[in-house]
Amino acid sequence: MKRAYSVDNVLQAKFNTLEFDGIWRDAVGCPELSGTWIVYGSVKNGKTSFTMQLAKYLTRFETVAYNSVEEGLSLSIQEAFKRTGMEDVRRRFLLLNKDSTKELLSRLRRRNSPNVVIIDTLQFWELAFAEYKRFKEEFPNKLFIYISHSAGNMPDGKLAQRIWRDANVSFRIEGFKAFPVGRYGGGKPVVISEEMAVKYWGV
């Protein structure tokens, strides 16, 4: 039988939080370094640019591994790196070239493995929901961020929607803005590109 917690246990518990500031604190508060986030949106709306910006910010706190499942090492990923200035964080950022679930599991079991893992894109990864839960259970002190295509205003597919419902933080990307919903506060949209957002929204 699992332990039951008293009110004092709950109120006195300590958690490993990320002390966000600026636009990121306005968006999601100060989140835990654990659980699941999801970023989803249609193509050509700024999803990759936003994810790179988020990944770069997260390197202030932890080493980030970006599993490029859909594109791998490619010219478009290189261009995204250049746009975001990823050379500034080269010591705390790793690009994984289409790691499978098995390969990623093995990588994360190593000592000093990254504590933030980004999967891009969920629809191109051979992942079952049982495996999704396994990653969460085996690595409770790591943060997993899944990038998903969308169908309308929802992530695309049953798996993506189950992950979205379970996520601590979600970002819906539209017109070069990221609209956050989370369990840690915040809620203010993030502008990915001022120029492109003005073209899309007209303001």
Image: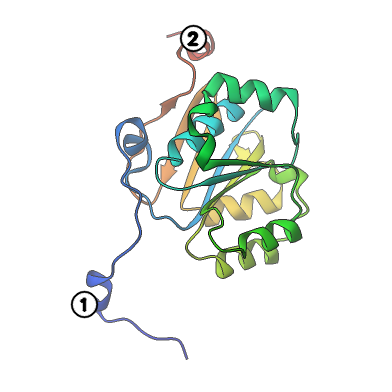
Direction front: furthest residue: 91
Q: Amino acid at mark 2?
A: Glu
**Sequence-first tag of 2 and 1:** 1
Pointer 2: what residue?
195
151 in relation to 85, above or below: below
**Tag shown at residue 8:** 1
Image coords of residue 39 (percent x, y): 56, 39
Residue at point 74% right, 23% down? 75
- For marks 2 and 1, give the CA distance: 50 Å
Give left or right: position of 20 versus 110.
left
**Colour scheme employed for the rendering of this structure:** rainbow
Nearest the viewer among 197 and 107 is 107
Residue at point 34% right, 54% down? 17
Nearest the viewer among 193 and 53 is 53
Nearest the viewer among 52 and 189 is 52
Image coords of residue 192 (percent x, y): 48, 22
58 in relation to 115, above or below: above
Q: Which quadrant of the structure image shows residue 3?
A: bottom left
Residue at point 50% right, 47% down? 63
Image coords of residue 6 (percent x, y): 27, 81
Q: Amino acid at mark 1?
A: Asp
35 in relation to 174, above or below: below
Q: Is residue 138 visible?
A: yes
